[in-house]
Image (spheres, rainbow, N blue to C red):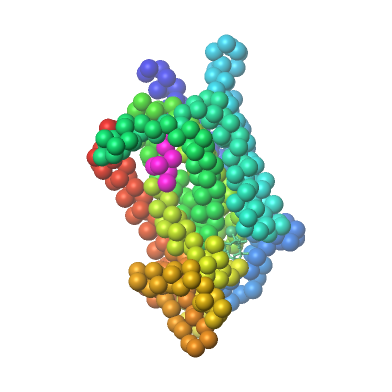
Amino acid sequence: MDFIYLHTMWILIILTFISSVAYFITDELIPKLKELFIKAGLYGIDLCKTSKDKVPEALGVVSGCTFLVTSFLFIPIVFGNNLMDVKSFPHSEFAELLAALLSICCMLLLGFADDVLDLRWRYKLLLPTIASLPLLVVYYVNFNSTTIIVPIPLRQILGTTINIGFVYYIYMGMLAVFCTNAINILAGINGLEVGQSVIIASSVIIFNILELGGDQSKAHTFSLYVMIPYLFTTLPLLKHNWYPSKVFVGDTFCYVSGMTFAVVAILGHFSKTVLLFFIPQIFNFIYSVPQLFHIIPCPRHRLPKYCAETDLLQTSVTVLSKKDQDNLLTKFVLKIFKLLAIVNINENNECIYMNNLTLINLFLVKLGPTSEVSLTKRLLCLQIICSCFAFLIRYPLASYFYNI
Ligand code: UD1
Ligand code: MG
């Protein structure tokens, strides 16, 4: 037992060392490849600045590639000991790691295709579902456990466990779709996509370290094998994407990140805990639903509006014409949002002007115009507070609902 623990520690130390090297390589590569991206037409304009300079887009492909290469180099280190002895080779663990990397690799490719081709929203939902298939197949072959443990207060009615069968696979597929898109729609100001991912990744790593000595240590070690290189290759991207952004990360990054979190959540069997680290993203998604499903008009960009005179960001608005207002569902949504006081509405005889339904705009509604960098910092502070809250729910409070 002690030997296995020591061996795992050594592997984690080596992985951290390789990942640190990957940090410096990624940090060097990003500025070097910037011009190449602009030449290839992969650039965007920073909508929250006066300068209309071309900012290279989709640099998430660079950190994504160094992340995958680091993971590939790491495979012989984890499985090197067993390579000579075919009989004791841990085929199922090997298949897990390969499926995880395959799903992430698929997402890198599909995300890059999205950045180049600017795909429509229905494909953005379809792509992660397809990319999660290798993962679900490995889950089926290795575990096929579709039983959920019922919280203590409901056990008298439902029993201790329920087998939800095929629905569990749909849940896991939807988790991949949610994680990828949730990060992509909480975006639009410098450093936010990468910042939130770094905080979620750090929270997952802390959780895995806390659980290393527990009875699920294998699953948490697997998660660390994926999360450590992810974190180290994402940090340099944050450095270059931080205000004022020299590069944009693109949908490639959001997809790779979301799939990485979904992979560890599914194969590490802690999807509920991962979802706890996504509280701001879950809120942002629920708040966005009326626009995502076109109950309220949804413009191409919902990021805040930049005011050049004050150098501050203001809420961006969507306009509801008379025809939009006639829709019963739209009326209902407006009523609920007004009641909850989570929307800023101005109306005249013709139109209703309301803020775009994103958490970023809600911050501006509540706190007033803010500079871009302090808005990013405030949103990231909220992410950290939510992570602390998640740990509180996961540890002291969970014992009221589960026998842990
Ligand atoms: C998602 C959001 C969209 C938001 C966009 C910003 C939904 C349904 N979609 O769309 O509302 O405007 O992300 O990323 O919520 N940009 C900046 N500053 C930044 C980051 C991005 O100005 O810090 C702009 C640039 O012009 C960049 C573009 O956003 O080129 C990238 O947008 P893209 O990622 O393609 O948008 P979506 O993911 O489709
Ligand atoms: Mg995007």
Q: Quadrant of the N terminus?
A: top left
Q: Residue at x 46, y 73 (%)?
A: 331
- The spot of residue 199 in percent (x, y) is 43, 50
> Eyeballing the image, is 367 above or below 91?
below
> Eyeballing the image, is 79 above or below 208?
above
- Of the pair 220 and 132, the residue shown nearer to us: 132
Residue 299 falls left or right of residue 224: right
Q: Residue at x 50, y 45 (%)?
A: 175
Instruction: Please state the extent of the stretch shown in magenta in the rendering.
Output: 269-275
- The spot of residue 298 in percent (x, y) is 56, 69
Residue 62 falls left or right of residue 154: right
- Of the pair 403 and 212, the residue shown nearer to us: 403
- The spot of residue 217 in percent (x, y) is 40, 28
Q: Residue at x 56, y 34 (%)?
A: 136
> Eyeballing the image, is 313 above or below 397?
below
Residue 252 falls left or right of residue 348: right
Tell me, yes or no, whether the highlighted magenta stretch contains residue 273. yes
Instruction: Tell me the chief SS of the magenta region.
Output: helix
